[in-house]
Amino acid sequence: MRAQFRSRIRLVLFVVACVALFILVRLYFVQIVHGEDYAQKADRQFASSASGLFDRGSIYFTRKDGTLISAATIATGFLVAINPQTLADPEAAYAAVASVASSTPSLRDTFLAAAAKKSQAHIEIMHRLSDEAGQALSAKDMPGVQVLRERWRYYPGATLAAQAIGIVSYGSGDELVGQTGLERVYEGSLSRSGDSLYKNFFAELFSNVGNLLVDAKDAREGSVVTTIEPEVQTRLENGLAKLNKRYSSKHSGGIIMDPSTGAIVALATYPSYDGNDLRNVNPLLLGNPLVEHVYEFGSIVKPITMTSGLDAGVITPETTYNDTGCITVNTARICNWDLKARGVVPMKQIIVQSLNIGSAWIATELGQEKFRDYFTRLFGQKTGIDLPNEGRALLGNLSKPQQIGYDTAAYGQGIAVTPIQMIRALGAIANGGRMVQPHLASAVRLNSGIERKLDWDQETPVFSAAAARATTEMMTAVVDEKLEGGKAKIPTMSVAAKTGTAQIPDGRGGYHTDRFFHSFVGFFPSYNPRFIILLYTNDPQGVEYASETLDATFLDLVHFLIEYYAVPPDRGFATTTSS
């Protein structure tokens, strides 16, 4: 009898413990995981009954120490609406509104014109009023004046990485959705149904037992964590703005990437826009030229040609050729940039002196089929970067039998690729011959509290490690011997680089003789790169060569990154003495 009593007590205690555990788990999800939703519900006393409060997941920058910084979030404030049917004294009502908000003649005209529409019961007058102003106006309790909660998308960095982060605006219906950038690509994770804001607390607590730990929405909805480092992004944007203004270029752009992982630390174009002020945005700036537009990059393609020849075994670093300065191919004449012949020179000088004739010679040695195979492998497919509207490379000249198309492609003319394709292809040289997938998002922080890492581990072998290293040595010589007359050399850090100057197509099958597209690529430390940097400026005025426009911006970024990330030296360790 006593044993039966003890068994019943244990059963009761077990049931009580299970119920208590269940309630504790549900409380965690309701109060911790969904706590912000219920804070929003407290604001419903101010919200319009006709519509819910806008909600959306956040987007974060990631500082070098792992700290998350808001790139896109939700701002909360008030809107002011009037009911003309119950507004007895429009002038007094306007005076009350003007006392807490910035008054303008147009606001007064708008307010009084709306007040005259007696057939309507709800007209919104002002939006995005601050909490302080909204609370002050609400306290006046004026008949016919409604102060309602509203929430909107807010970008704390304003223009910072705007074209990568993207914008939110109304889609085909009446819902706010991501239209560009990461806002669009990760719409499925960032969007919110909004129904959770209006659930009864106790109904939420005891409902949906089957989805105790995580429901379907919790497995999808969350915030996006990016690889963009805000300090590096700021440095890049400032450098591009300075560059573009100095040379009155049409636009300029840049990407900084980890060549071993494809994680993009910064990317920017100038001019850009402020995502908080879409009314004054030029629609042409909403796209992202780094991903969507193609360009003829010029001589930064030469390292790719060189590595292809080395990988195929048709040349070695010791191979020489006779540089005549100009050659005729299929009745077309192509020349070195300075029209000068170099005589018999080794392969290194093709990169160091940026010789068009040498690059064309390598293309001939490779043969059309092999050349086409390498360039198609590198540029024939989209990169798959997590940004919308990625463009495709224009490689049509490599499907024709004329050799001139291959020779010009060897030094970056006659083919056009996107900047993101270019940095991925050149990144393969920096990464020991392996091409990675560039990306901006590293994880999605789910509403359940779980962080889901995104898989970007795929690599594509395109060159042998030996071929990549040999080209890297040549590119390092560019900085040590050629760039700024050798003054750019960093005694404690090896840096590999290449400049590019391309003539801009005239739209009639030829090229402008006085308009140029400048590009610059570099990575460091040369033999175990932490970063690869791609820069370009389109149609700079009063200057011809990229070494005159982009080297200062590139070197500034290199020195900044070395110091900011404390990148350890890889050669010529400096020593100091003290007395």
Image (tube, rainbow, N blue to C red):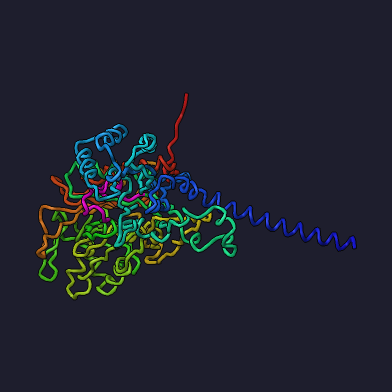
Which residue does the image show at 33% across and 44% down from the upper left? 79
Instruction: Establish if 534 lies above or below 559.
Output: below
> Does the magenta segment cover residue 217?
no
Residue extending farthest top: 579
Instruction: Establish if 224 lies above or below 75.
Output: below
Is residue 342 visible to the viewer in this orientation of the structure? yes
Residue 81: where, in percent of width, then height?
A: 31, 44
Which residue does the image show at 43% across and 37% down from the upper left? 574
Depth check, front residue: 525 or 9:
9
Residue extending farthest right: 1
Residue 215: where, in percent of width, then height?
A: 53, 62
The residue stretch that appears in magenta: 266-287
Lateral position of residue 269 relative to residue 135, left or right: left
Lateral position of residue 377 relative to residue 64, left or right: left
Residue 162: where, in percent of width, then height?
A: 31, 49
Is residue 489 visible to the viewer in this orientation of the structure? no
Count of number-bearing discs:
0
Depth check, front residue: 402 or 329:
402
Depth check, front residue: 437 or 487:
437
Quadrant placement of the N terminus: bottom right
Quarter-of-image position of residue 138: top left
Residue 406: where, in percent of width, then height?
A: 21, 68
